Image (tube, grey):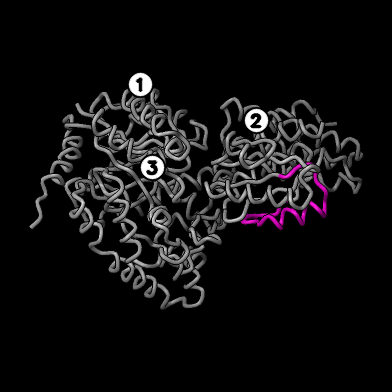
Amino acid sequence: MVDLKALTASVGELDEEKVLEVLGSFVATNPSEEDAQQVVAACQSGMAIVGDLYEKGEYFVGDLIFAGELLTNAINTLKPVLGSANTASAGSIVLGTVAGDLHDIGKNIFKSMCEAAGFTVYDLGIDQPAGAFIDKVKEVKPNIIGMSGVLTLALEAMKDTVDAIKEAGLRDSVKIIIGGNPVTKEACAQIGADAFTTNAAEGVKICQGWVK
Amino acid sequence: MSDNTLKNERDQLFTDLMKGIKPKRVPVTAGISIEAALEKVGYSVKRDQYSPQKCYEAAEEMARRFDTDTLPTVPSTQAAVFRYIDQKFMQPGADGFFQHPNIAPLETEEYPEFSKDPFEFIVNKIQPRVFGILQEEPVLGHLKIKIARDVVASKFAGMGVKLAEQYQRSTAQTTCNLLWAPFDFIADYIRSFSTIMIDVKRNPQWVLDACEAVLQYEIEQIKITPKRGAIPTISYPLHMAPFMKTKDVEKFWWPTFKKLMIATQEAGFIPAIHYEQNWDPHLDLINDIPTPAIITFEASDQKLVAQKVSTNFVWRSMYPAVLLKTGTKQQCIDEAKRTLDNVAGGGNYIFSTNKGAIRGSDVKDENLQAVIEFVKEYGKY
């Protein structure tokens, strides 16, 4: 069996070569699904370390992007031994960049960190009108809606989206978090979201608090 | 013949600064984009950014409203060119406002070929992937792009000079070109923001080689840039370093940037360096660039800048623009006083907001007007 603590540390250090080497050897031993799930959990704990180091200012956005890539690679390596059994999801999030805004770097970082924390994320993509959020919410009944944007104009689109969600009678069934460069406490209150963040790691913690 | 007394006085503020002489007062500038100007006068960005006449009218109205020492809005936009050549890097949203999507037209394994000759590679491989017009017309497309650029430039030609004279604004500092730190060029136009962060980890030597190759490519561009104005500048909007660890910045980002700044100065230009986002973690690096240079900060801490960055540079900006949208007139003035107290003492400071207004609603007119008048008075040396 893998040294889980060492694996967690390697993910935290973003040592991709070492992580993939350990996972490759592990997969070659034809392990049980249960063991494989423990290894996934160890990788996810490593991502939590990455998030903490980012919040402390030791890691930067570039490190978060690479961490997301590393985790995707790790899970792909483990896929043959993970089996078809669905693991318990921490919760579900419908995520998108709002209408009029084509930016997705921050959204994608948040997405990969949420997935690393065990959330199921339904990513709508960029420039998404309120109707797209509403259709997806009706379809998958998520715990959380995440709206992202970089332009100041995005704040207006976020407000329009929340208003439309209210009109559709869906507001009470979800928590809403907004993220991106222009979001502030004041904007959050005006938009009618439940939380805001400009920090992906903090955003994940807020979402975890909601689904406890 | 118009009397240019006021314009000359304003020019003097900037030329003094560049000579290391304390000017009569802090020069005041404001950056209101053409899109913001169009919206402020009630025009549609979607339609009217393609009309040089409407752009001129909007820029003129900004000059009327805001008595800054340089034009608040320069009547010029490349929107028609982006649209005509179907530039994948600059795509309009539903309201017509152009944005820069995160795309990577260079495949990982193409790095060595790119680094061998960036110019060849950009023209023959990158541009056909990102300029829609070249997909339809691989040969004549390049000519059409050139013609489109010339036609658009000719439509706006002379407008800025005319406005500056009419409204007596300084033209001492002239932006002669806009270039990029080599690492940023690769991130913004070749590999995308996200992908280059992965390249740094997986293929570090390829990234280093590409930075060196882009450096040479940009030095060639500096050499063919026409020099204009009393203070000819080349503008460098910096992008990626605030998203990287200092250790990575020092290894991948900084060395070729520093060489580029020196090459800019050796060619007789002043670098106008825009330290975008928050540079606080890397502020210690900044004094490593030789002077003269005009340096702008977007999100760095004013006091930290004053403490760490050499006063041999001309500092610019640092006033928090968001306040002009959300604050009261008095709050805006109080903040202007705080800013001048923090960063104007050395006599090496040009007032402007930390971010330009890019949409009409970004700035309340009365707030900006009050701040301009306050800085002109309180900023007297």
Cα separation, mark 1 vs mark 3, equals 26 Å
- Amino acid at circle 3: Thr
Q: Label 3 neighbourhood size at 10 Å, few (<14), some (14-19), many (20+)?
A: many
Q: Residue at x 7, y 58 (%)?
A: B1
Q: Nearer the viewer, residue A4 or B179?
A: B179
Circle 3 marks a residue in which chain? B
Residue depth check, mark 1 versus mark 2: number of the one nearer the observer:
1
Write down the residue under mark 3: B256
- Total marks shown come to 3
* Any part of residue A45 in sight: yes
Q: Residue at x 55, y 46 (%)?
A: A150
Location of residue B319 by image quarter? top left
Specify the farthest residue to the left. Answer: B1
Q: Are marks 1 and 2 in contact (CB under 8 Å)?
A: no
Q: Label 2 neighbourhood size at 10 Å, few (<14), some (14-19), many (20+)?
A: some
Which portion, as a residue range, is magenta? A123-145
Give left or right: position of A163 versus B279.
right
Image location of residue B377, percent across then percent down: 23, 31
Height in image: B377 above or below A108? above
- Amino acid at circle 1: Gln
